[in-house]
Image (spheres, coloured by chain):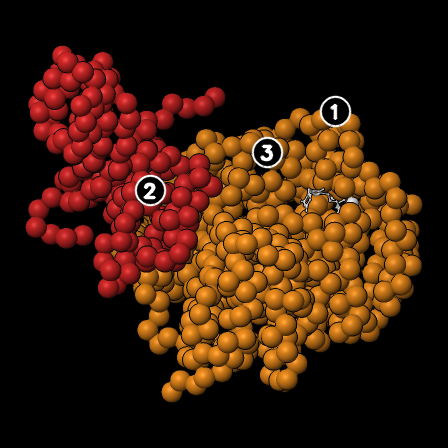
């Protein structure tokens, strides 16, 4: 049965029917009719951010920590253009977002009207798909379709641009289509023969490795359970990209740590030397492969991905399987069980011995200082003192992000939100806001850098307004540390524009926002201060003053092969260490 | 060191929803990812179903060609993509309108050549012709080259359209 109602009412009704409970947004002229409807209902909670970029990142935090799409509502022109960084971030990290933007009246489109921007034009390459709705009668269908596109296949952001007159005019409401989409039908089930071939190839391996990514997390909690089962069954070593951390627990005995530019020695060496590589829900990004020509020279590669365009993009693989990770893993586990006869443990015992040798390098070790806090130590203490709590970590971008990835121990999926593909400074705080909204009782910590946090720090006000007890833990090295590290290593230590000359007093800043400020600068005061942060029932900004010039190791310089890694211990002479 | 890679030329047919912006999406994909477009044509082919067909001639390494197909296929308004070069024998045609100006011997020669190429005269004045020519791109290029010495003024070409041979539809 169709009903006549205003476009703004249609928007709200469609959101409710899609199961949306929260919208992150910021009002303006072109969304006033929708805001007026929001005011008159109680089903959907609106979280008022302080910048539209923050709205998208918050929605991303919400989405990544719940598996549900995040929803954004912003006005036309500057409201919409402010979302661009967030949209691209969500596109690169395959996060489902539905972003509703207000637009000027349809008769004004193209006339350079006040606060007009060509939003579908600008966001076309920033989104998985986008729509301009010109008729109120199309509105409900398009919004439902936007949710379908955002969550199905490889997830991503979808923009729906809604002119103001379309919000005001009345039209028909219709529910979601029962028949799916007329052209977008992503393949979910993997090819049965390909999966059997994959299992056969895996059973022949002498030096196997599982290389997993964000696709495992995106596929849902069942995929992580099945991955754990597969590791248990096969006994294979496993490593993961930055985006996939938590799918397999850090405490698991087969865990090699993260791989890639700042991955562990054992993970990268095993990737280089393996004979069968099983890539599951990852995409051979350049931060993972290093020099493509020298990538895993002896490996036969199996690649499972829901997006066919990820396959053979950077690395030619031997056995592609297009499908949802969860489905493919389920089949792999089933077939492996039915076929197991080989003594896999004996077959790969030599491999494990080799890996244990690499582990022995203890590649993440660092030298603690007596008078100064090493950033690695600070992260280890945060980890230790938050253990046993339901803790979610977000990060900004830089050295602190890499140390967080290396030193935090992720046991569960959906508990780690970081900007991987785009590397967006300013992501962590708004993402933490979104996570805390979705998990009000959890401990949510943003591991931040003093430079990154200044990109979106106005969102502390959002946290204070909604009593969100997020903890911003700043590793304050007074440098754009990651930039400084590259300048040290590759530009003759000329620290061009990477020193934070004038920093705000973060403790006073916290207080100015109505949050709690804490500072620690000596190793001996660290634990008590972190404990105070955790125990504080409200938002905290923690200024952790750390050693200025620490570097993140191991490091594979960009464009180098996996086995030419720089380790912390021989960092002084900067000689790549191979075997 | 940059490795020498062999570039292959492929003709693809893309069936899309005939909706606003769909061509911009396809063109944006090519420019954004640095793929080549040698020719691109588009027109609505099924009015009732709101479907348009795009024919793209592109070139790239085999890996890039597979990428292009996969990238096109995952676009939301794209129904189907056929790589005609891979999927079997097909016919490629292009239409050109060619304006030639001249008098006397030149004019006669232009007409004789046009006749040899089976080009039609679609406009004529005392001192000019407009020829209409269809055929493979190579044939059109040859014709244009021959028209140069006899008074070529202007050329417009549609770009390539293509269809599979035989009784089966795509
Ligand atoms: C929006 C944005 N601008 C610039 C960069 C480039 N960049 C990468 S890391 C970094 C420095 C980050 O400094 P800080 O937040 O203090 O973290 P640290 O590396 O010191 O831990 C910069 C400028 C970026 N990633 N994002
Ligand atoms: Mg810093």
Q: Secondary structure at mark 1?
A: loop
Q: CA distance from mark 2 to mark 3?
A: 27 Å
Q: Secondary structure at mark 3?
A: loop
Q: Label for residue A558?
A: 3
Q: Secondary structure at mark 2?
A: helix
Circle 3 packing at 10 Å, graded few (<14), some (14-19), many (20+), is: few
Q: Position of residue A164 (x, y in %)?
A: 56, 68
Chain ID, red in image? B
**Hue used for the chain lettered A:** orange
Residue that carries the numbered disc 2 in the rendered image: B66
Up-down: is A77 above or below A438? above
| Relative side of A463 to A57, left or right | right
Q: Residue at x 27, y 49 (%)?
A: B43
Residue placed furthest toward the front: B126
Residue A493 position by quadrant: top right
Q: Residue at x 90, y 64 (%)?
A: A511
The reply to whether callout 1 and callout 2 are in contact (CB within 8 Å) is no
Q: Are marks 2 and 3 on the same chain?
A: no
Q: Position of residue A370 (x, y in %)?
A: 90, 45
Q: CA distance from mark 3 to mark 1?
A: 17 Å
Q: Are marks 3 and 1 on the same chain?
A: yes
Q: CA distance from mark 1 to mark 2?
A: 42 Å
Q: Chain of mark 1?
A: A
Q: Nearer the viewer, residue A69 or A537?
A: A69
Residue A363 position by quadrant: top right
Q: Chain of mark 3?
A: A
Up-down: is A400 above or below A464? above
Label 3 vs 1, first from the N-terminus: 1
Asked whether residue B78 appears in the rendered view, the answer is yes
Residue B49 position by quadrant: bottom left
Residue that carries the numbered disc 1 in the rendered image: A492
Q: Quadrant of ligand 1?
A: top right
């Amino acid at each position: 049965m169709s009903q006549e109602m205003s476009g703004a009412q249609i928007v709200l009704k469609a959101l409710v029917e899609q199961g949306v409970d929260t919208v992150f947004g910021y009002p303006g002229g072109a969304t006033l009719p929708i805001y007026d409807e929001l005011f008159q209902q109680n089903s959907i909670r609106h979280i008022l951010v302080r910048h539209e970029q923050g709205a998208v990142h918050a929605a991303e935090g919400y989405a990544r920590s719940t598996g549900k799409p995040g929803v954004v509502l912003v006005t036309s022109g500057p409201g919409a253009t402010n979302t661009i960084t967030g949209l691209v971030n969500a596109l690169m990290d395959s996060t489902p977002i539905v972003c509703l933007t207000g637009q000027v009246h349809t008769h004004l489109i193209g006339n350079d009207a006040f606060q007009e921007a060509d939003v579908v034009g600008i966001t076309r390459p920033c989104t998985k798909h986008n729509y301009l709705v010109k008729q109120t009668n199309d509105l409900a269908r398009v919004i439902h379709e936007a949710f379908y596109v955002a969550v199905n296949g490889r997830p991503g952001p979808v923009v729906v641009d809604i002119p103001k007159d379309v919000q005001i005019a009345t039209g028909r409401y219709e529910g979601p289509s029962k028949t799916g989409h007329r052209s977008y039908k992503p393949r979910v089930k993997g090819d049965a023969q390909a999966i059997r071939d994959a299992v056969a190839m895996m059973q022949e391996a002498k030096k196997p490795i599982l290389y997993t990514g964000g696709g495992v997390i995106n596929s849902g909690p069942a995929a992580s359970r099945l991955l754990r089962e597969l590791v248990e069954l096969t006994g294979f070593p496993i490593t993961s990209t930055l985006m996939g951390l938590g799918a397999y627990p850090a405490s698991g005995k087969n865990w090699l740590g993260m791989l890639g530019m700042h991955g562990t020695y054992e993970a990268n060496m095993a990737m280089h030397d393996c004979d069968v590589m099983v890539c599951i829900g990852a995409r051979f990004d350049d931060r993972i492969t290093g020099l493509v020509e020298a990538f895993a020279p002896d490996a036969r590669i199996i690649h499972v991905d829901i997006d066919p365009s990820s396959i053979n993009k950077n690395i030619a693989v031997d056995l592609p399987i297009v499908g949802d990770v969860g489905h493919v893993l389920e089949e792999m586990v089933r077939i492996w069980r039915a076929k197991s006869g080989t003594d896999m443990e004996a077959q790969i015992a030599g491999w494990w011995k080799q890996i244990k040798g690499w582990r022995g390098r203890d590649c993440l070790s660092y030298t603690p200082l007596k008078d100064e806090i090493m950033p690695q130590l600070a992260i280890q203490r945060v980890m230790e003192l938050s253990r046993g709590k339901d803790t979610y970590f977000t990060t900004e971008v830089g050295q602190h992000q890499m140390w967080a990835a290396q030193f935090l121990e992720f046991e569960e999926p959906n508990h780690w939100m970081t900007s991987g593909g785009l590397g967006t400074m300013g992501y962590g705080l708004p993402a933490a806001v979104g996570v805390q909204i979705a998990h009000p009782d959890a401990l949510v910590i943003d591991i931040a850098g003093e430079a990154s946090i200044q990109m979106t720090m106005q969102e502390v006000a959002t946290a204070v307004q909604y009593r969100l007890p997020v903890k911003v833990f700043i590793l304050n090295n007074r440098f754009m540390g990651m930039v400084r590290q590259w300048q040290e290593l590759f530009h003759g230590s000329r620290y061009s524009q990477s020193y934070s000359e004038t920093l705000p007093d973060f403790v006073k800043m916290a207080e100015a926002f109505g949050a709690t400020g804490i500072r620690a600068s000596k190793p001996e005061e660290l634990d008590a201060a972190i404990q105070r942060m955790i125990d504080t029932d409200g938002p905290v900004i923690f200024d952790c003053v750390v050693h200025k010039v620490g570097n993140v190791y191991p490091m594979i310089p960009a464009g180098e092969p996996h086995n030419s890694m720089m380790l912390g211990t021989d960092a002084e002479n900067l000689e790549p260490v191979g075997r | 060191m940059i490795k020498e890679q062999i570039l292959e030329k492929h003709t693809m047919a893309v069936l899309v929803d005939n909706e606003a912006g769909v061509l911009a999406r396809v063109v944006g994909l090519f420019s954004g990812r640095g793929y080549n477009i040698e020719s691109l044509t588009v027109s609505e082919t099924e009015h009732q179903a709101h479907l348009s067909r795009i024919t793209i001639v592109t070139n790239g390494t085999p890996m890039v060609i597979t990428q292009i197909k996969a990238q096109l296929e995952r676009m939301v308004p794209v129904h189907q993509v056929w790589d005609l070069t891979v999927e079997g024998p097909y016919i490629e045609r292009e239409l050109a309108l060619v304006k030639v100006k001249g008098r006397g011997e030149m004019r006669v020669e232009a007409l004789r050549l046009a006749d040899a190429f089976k080009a039609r005269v679609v406009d004529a004045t005392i001192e000019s012709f407009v020829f209409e020519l269809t055929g493979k791109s190579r044939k059109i290029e040859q014709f244009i080259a021959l028209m140069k010495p006899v008074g070529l003024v202007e050329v417009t070409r549609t770009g390539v359209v293509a269809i599979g041979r035989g009784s089966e539809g795509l």
